Amino acid sequence: MEQFRRSSDSTSSDLIPFAVAVHAILNGLAVKIRSQNNRGVQIENGETKSRNLYEAGT
């Protein structure tokens, strides 16, 4: 059984399964997820668009 672990140090590769699941639950809505200390992942149209996503918080 696969386990999903999330922490402030999760990498974009760690977050992809979680992002894909959220993307599916939201009926294909674009999803961007990042951890506190690393760059994140962007999912659009069922595909991983970016594994090196960085967006500064406001």
Image: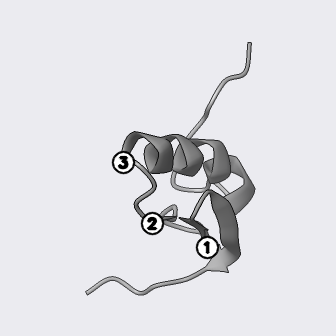
Residue tagged 1: 39
Q: Farthest residue in the left direction?
A: 58
x and y, in percent, of residue 32 in the image? 47, 67
Residue at image coords 62%, 57%: 46
* Residue in the foreground of this view, choosing between 50 and 25: 25
58 lies left or right of 33:
left
x and y, in percent, of residue 3 in the image? 67, 24
Residue at image coords 62%, 31%: 4
Residue tagged 3: 26
* Residue in the foreground of this view, choosing between 8 and 51: 51
Task: Give the amino acid at mark 2.
Answer: Ala
Q: Which of marks 3 and 1 is nearer the N terminus?
A: 3
Badge 2: residue crowd in 10 Å (few <14, some 14–19, many ≥20):
some
50 lies left or right of 8:
right
Rounded to the nearest angstrom, the CA distance separating label 2 from label 3 is 8 Å
x and y, in percent, of residue 22 in the image? 45, 45
Residue at image coords 74%, 12%: 1
Q: Residue 30 carries which label?
A: 2
Rounded to the nearest angstrom, the CA distance separating label 3 from label 1 is 22 Å
Task: Give the amino acid at mark 1.
Answer: Arg
**Element under label 3?**
loop
x and y, in percent, of residue 37 in the image? 55, 68
